[in-house]
Amino acid sequence: MIDFRSDTVTKPTAGMLDAMMSAKVGDDVFGEDETVNALEEKLATMFNMEAAMFCPSGTMSNQIAIKCFTNPMDEVICDQTAHVYRYEGGGIAYNSLASVRLLNGERGILTPEMIEPEINEDNIHYPNSSLVVLENTVNKGGGKCYTLSQIEPIHNLCAIKGIKLHLDGARIFNALVATGNKAKDYGKYFDGISVCLSKGLGAPVGSVFLSDAQTIKKARKIRKVLGGGMRQAGFLAAAGIYALDNHVKRLATDHSHAKALAATLTNASFVSSVMPVETNIVLFDITPNLKVDSVVKALTNKGVLCNATSNKTVRFVTHLDVAAAAIDETIEIITKLNI
Ligand SMILES: *Cc1c(COP(=O)(O)O)cnc(C)c1O
């Protein structure tokens, strides 16, 4: 099976497993796991942030960030497709007792002009707008990227209004590779950044929340309360360090694989349109005469796994466990497919 359902399906490579098995570990709840500490320091330095905290998942990183940056009764501003709103189980309400103001970005990309009118003025009737969350790349936007020049004016607006700015950077390295922007330039624009190690970077587990030292101190307490304080987590952090050292540059390969798939899909009989590809996600709409489940099933029957993301949209995600030969094979299958 060629598995395009998600970039989370990757399994650790032999090199990554070696790095994990030889990790030096300790009790991370005591702050004594040197590999976890090294991963946290590595990412904080990379993004020019003061401090960092290893988490079991991107959801936990984001939810802790939102808890740190809001008070009960506040409002979080984000795009209507945002992972923090759609795919984190209602966690903003449950964990932070906050409401959400949803915007209609262009493929999930927000602008200061969209955000500014949605910021509540100080009035007894209104929730306090305390946090803006951006997502880069935008998952539901088909892996679309923000560039730093689009982020800077949003940062400036938030700074003027006294609002925190958090980045859901589950696929931030895909955005960095695609835009050529530098990780170190990100730190000055965001109060918090979540980075996933278990997406395109290929680690089995893990996400890191980056922020200032005081926020990370608070975040460690919240992580403990949520049950996310892990003990010899260095075995997992070692996979993250290995991924950062070995799996970032190669994301460009996933991006060119995604573009090759998109080019083939554009001409396929069962496809009506393909969203322009910027990174490793391909979203396409099927022709109106077809049912999305039958398209997914026809591809699955030929050995190609993918996901329906709406009643007319199918998603392919490329990643390091789909090699060039499998892309060629998939292109042949798509070209010949009759539904
Ligand atoms: C995957 C993902 C996350 C985190 O998901 P986990 O499965 O909890 O690690 C967060 N944001 C986006 C945009 C994602 O795609």
Image (cartoon, rainbow, N blue to C red):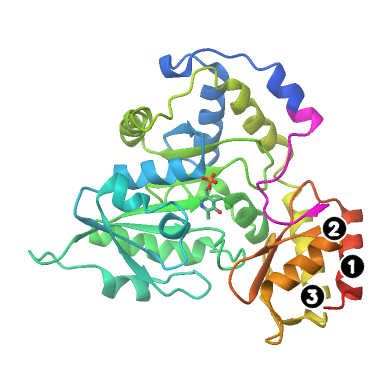
- Disc 1 target residue: 333
Mark 2 or mark 1: which comes first in sequence?
Answer: 2
Mark seen at residue 303 = 2
Residue 227 is left or right of residue 119, and the answer is: right
Of circles 1 and 3, the one toward us is: 1
Could you tell whether 215 is left or right of 151 in the image?
left
Label pair 2/1, CB-CB below 8 angstroms: yes
Residue at left 47%, top 55%?
87
Mark sitting earlier along the chain (3/2): 3
Q: Nearer the viewer, residue 31 or 223?
A: 223
Q: Distance between the residues labelled 1 and 3?
A: 11 Å
Mark 1 is surrounded, within 10 Å at the Cα level, by few (under 14), some (14 to 19) or many (20 or more) other residues, namely some
Q: Where is residue 207 in the image (x, y as percent from the top left)?
A: 53, 39
| Residue 265's disc number | 3
Look at the image and give the residue range highlighted in magenta. 1-16
Query: Tag 2's secondary structure?
Result: loop
Element at badge 1? helix
Looking at the rendered structure, the kind of residue marked 2 is: Gly
User: Number of callouts in the render?
Assistant: 3
Q: Is residue 136 left or right of residue 16?
A: left
* Residue 134, image x, y percentages: 44, 59
> Can you say whether 171 is above or below 256 in the image?
above
Question: Amino acid type of disc 1?
Answer: Ile
Q: What's the amino acid at mark 3?
A: Leu
Residue at horizontal 73 percent and vertical 67 percent from the top: 296
- Does the Cβ of the disc 2 residue fall within 8 Å of ligand 1? no
Q: Earlier in the sequence, mark 1 or mark 3?
A: 3
